[in-house]
Structure formats: structure tokens, C-alpha cells
Amino acid sequence: MTTANALYDVPGPKTRKRHRLYGIASTVVILGLLAWILYLLFDTDQFTYTKWMPFEYKGIQELLLRGLGNTLKAFGLAAVLSLALGTLLAVGRLSDHRPVRWLSTLVVEFFRAMPVLVMIFFIFVALKVQPLPALVAGLTLYNGSVLAEVFRSGVNSVERGQREAAFALGMRKTQVMSYVLVPQAVRAMLPAIISQLVVALKDTSLGYLITYEEFLHAGKLIASNLDYDLPFIPVVMVISPIYIGMCMLLSWFAGWVSRREQRSPKTEAVDVAPAEPGTLLPRVQ
């Protein structure tokens, strides 16, 4: 006899057997797909020594490390500036002053609708800005606008009674935002913030289109080398895991921040002493 759960019924023996069959079938399909991909790679001579030889040279290694450093530099600047711009625009969208709210909404909607590559090219070509500032500016304008909506919706997602109770205690709007709404909204916003920062990290690869020497640009230089039989697939197999690892590191950092915040004295539950019998008030005659 199965027991019920709050969200679903615990599967019975037949259902568990069916799930195991589904799992086995899925595993077989995935392994078959991986085997087919490996066959194609070996069939097209992607694992030959000539194609992997470039990574043995110190100059190639330094080129990749320099590109990785430039990618992290662009991402770091874009992430900090995007968070700052997103906060500023979110405050504007939540303002009680109508002109400020309208202006912030116009800025957010405009830069959210503009393709990132168009903004980067416009800043680089029309404004004649250097590659790094052009890349950072384009990423900041787009991701900052998206983060502004994340911040605004996160604050608005807090239960309305929290806001009303804070105002009833005589707190000003700045105090309500700083001490009541934002601390509660951060937990809900954190996954979306990290997701957007991952987007910013991946979009740094657009820098190679404006000759910024980032990680993908370094890989492109290696992959287009005729002396090594155009090692495009080996370059992808080297660069892709590094991008995936950086994105996973961001996700791990978000989880660490979330766990640390839950252990914070400001968010931990406070132990309340059990009720004890007190002195009885005298009866009023």
C-alpha cells in the first residue's frame, strides 16, 4: 500500500518498474548518441596529432590564457556595472514620481529590445570607442536593463502585507525598501540574477567581432591556422568545457551566497522562551 505525499502519490511497484525501463531506454539512447558523435569525430580525423599539436606550444598556451584573462576582465566590469545600472533603473521604476518612473521605463524597454551586437557595433563604430569599453558598455546597457526588471519584479513579489506593516510602524519608504522588501526579495531574485550574469559571461564572446582579444578570439586564431590542418573541433573541445566550468562556478557561488544568507543572524529564527505562568492580576471589584 502506497503512502500519499503533499505534492504527489508515491509510485507503486508497476510504476517504479516502468520508470526503470524509461531510465534504461533513455540511457541507451544517450550512450548511442555519444557513440555516434565519437564515431564521426574519429571518422573525420579530429583526434589526429596534427590537430592537437598546437596546444603543446607555449605561445599558444599564453594566447589562450591571455584571451581567458581578457574575457574575465570584460565580464567582471560588465557584471558590476550591470548590477549598478539595474539597481538604479529599478529604483527609478519603483519611484513615486511619475516623470522618473516613465523615463526609467523608457530606458529599460529600449535597451532590452535592442540586440546586444547592434549596441556593441554602434558604440565601437559610430562613437569610435576602443574594443574593451565598447564591449563592456553594450553588455552593461542590455544586462542592466534586464536586471532592472528582475529587481523590480522581485521587490513587487514580496507580500503586500509586509510593506503595509512597515509603513504602519512609521517607517519611511527608503527604510521599508532597505530593511523589509529588498532582504526578502534577494532570495527570490538570486537565481534570475545569476542566470543573467551567465548570459553576460557568454556574450563576452561577441568581442571577437570588434577585434577584442578575448577567449573566443584566441580560439578563432588557432582554429583558422592552416599549418595545423584547421583544428576547429579540437579548439571547440578545449574552449567549451572552460566556458561551462565558469558558468557552473557562478551557479555554485550563487548557492554558497544563498546558504550563507540563510545562516545569517538577521535571517535565522530566534528561539523564544516557553511561556511560563506569571503573576495573576488582582480582580477588579
Image (spheres, grey):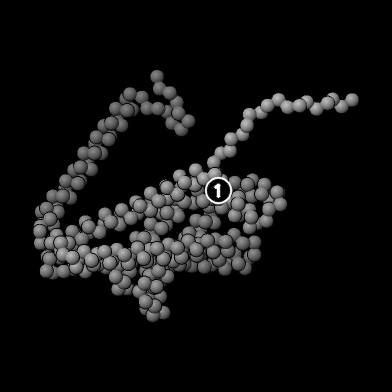
Q: Provide residue 184's location: percent of width, then percent of height.
A: 55, 48
Q: Residue at x 11, y 53 (%)?
A: 42
- Looking at the picture, does residue 266 appear above or below residue 285? below
Residue under label 1, please give it.
Answer: 184
Q: Provide residue 284's location: percent of width, then percent of height.
A: 87, 27
Q: In the image as oriented, which residue stretches furthest toward the top?
A: 1
Q: Please indicate whether residue 83 sits to the left or right of residue 46 in the image.
A: right
Quarter of the image that includes the C terminus:
top right
Q: Provide residue 23's location: percent of width, then percent of height.
A: 27, 35
Q: In the image as oriented, which residue stretches furthest toward the right?
A: 285
Q: Residue at x 38, y 80 (%)?
A: 128
- Looking at the picture, does residue 104 appear above or below residue 47? below
Q: Please indicate whether residue 225 sits to the left or right of residue 261 in the image.
A: left
Within the image, what quadrant is residue 41 found in? bottom left
Q: Is residue 270 visible?
A: yes
**Label 1 element class:** helix
Q: Nearer the viewer, residue 261 or 1?
A: 261
Quarter of the image that includes the N terminus:
top left
Q: Provide residue 9's location: percent of width, then percent of height.
A: 42, 28
- Looking at the picture, does residue 257 appear above or below residue 223? above
Q: Nearer the viewer, residue 196 or 36?
A: 196
- Identify which amino acid the numbered label 1 is placed on: Gln
Q: Residue at x 58, y 35 (%)?
A: 271
Q: Please indicate whether residue 149 sits to the left or right of residue 204 in the image.
A: right
Q: Residue at x 21, y 39 (%)?
A: 28
